Image: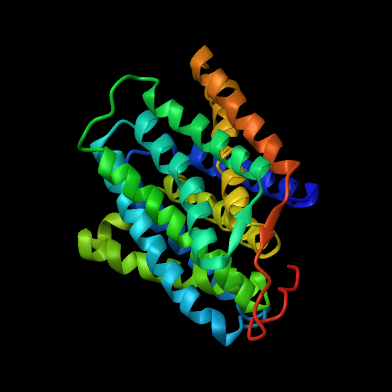
Amino acid sequence: MSIGISFIVLLAALLHASWNALLRAGTDRLWSMTVMCIAIALVCAVLVFFLPLPARASWGCVILSALLHIGYNLFLVRTYRSGDLGQTYPIARGSSPLLVSLGAALFAGELPDAISLAGVVLVSGGILSLAFQGGRIGRDSLPYALGTGCFIGAYSVTDGIGVRLSATPAGYTIWMCLLWGVLMPPVYGFMRDWRSLIRSPRETGIAAAGGVVSLVAYGIIIFAMSLGPMGPVSALRETSVVFAALIGRFFLHERLTAYRIAACIVVAIGAICIGHSGASIRPPSSGTSPRPAPL
């Protein structure tokens, strides 16, 4: 994967860690995610007037990805409720690069070379090892954490395929995120009283800002998947745990243990392998849309 793509994916990982740090202090993650989605929908509703529509062939992926993102939101909230964040989050994020690599091989014909595959395994292994830092993992939380990872893998592969069919990464991203953002508030209304969405301006502003940052971060990932292999891109994205550890240490005054430092070093080595590797991608068939235009 080229140095340029690796750099922008690492930037997205930093943004991903940043908005997670903004929301870490919050206890009501369903509310936070819903406000984030509302902010995403509002931004996308403006941008659709300035961006081209994605190609017709990609609209199935737009709809499927939006639905998968809703499933991801609900599973993640359930994961946080049933298990310790320090254990469940690494399982969800660490399992997804391996699942994306498998899905990309099965559905997009992407066959990573040995160095790239080793990088993906190192990143996933380093992240997953963080789940065992605190001891045994609860049986109740494990299925939801793995389910969250499956949703991440599923929407990542869907978006990787969809953006290559769309001919416009920005247009695909905006329409998918608009649909995702529009669908989440009714889900919240079904689960809770609508009036509980109203909170203090400070809380609402932080969550909304997190939504905008997450939109930019994932837009970068979708753009990267239009140009590079999905598995390595997904693995590099999950290096956000390294940035999260550094943000927690220097800005939130969290303790950085030797175990966590070792795991972050493994993740970093995996990222270096990915940055210096290539991947073979099956050539598109004659009926495939042209190569996506840059953002």
Q: Quadrant of residue 14?
A: top right
**Residue under the point 49% across and 32% down:** 125
**Residue under the point 32% across and 50% down:** 147
Vertical placement of 229 versus 175: above or below?
A: above
**Residue under the point 40% across and 42% down:** 92
| Residue 87 or residue 51, whichever sits in front | 87
State how many labels appear. 0
Vertical placement of 262 versus 205: above or below?
A: above
Q: Position of residue 246 (x, y in %)?
A: 60, 26
Q: Position of residue 150 (x, y in %)?
A: 38, 53
Q: Position of residue 135 (x, y in %)?
A: 32, 19
Report whether 100 appears left or right of 53: left
- Farthest top residue in view: 258
**Residue under the point 56% across and 33% down:** 122
Q: Position of residue 158 (x, y in %)?
A: 49, 66
Vertical placement of 259 versus 211: above or below?
A: above
| Residue 66 or residue 159, whichever sits in front | 159
- Quarter of the image containing the C terminus? bottom right
Is residue 43 visible to us here?
no
Is residue 60 visible to us here?
yes
- Farthest right residue in view: 3
Report whether 263 appears left or right of 66: right
Colouring rule applied to residues = rainbow
Report whether 117 appears left or right of 126: right
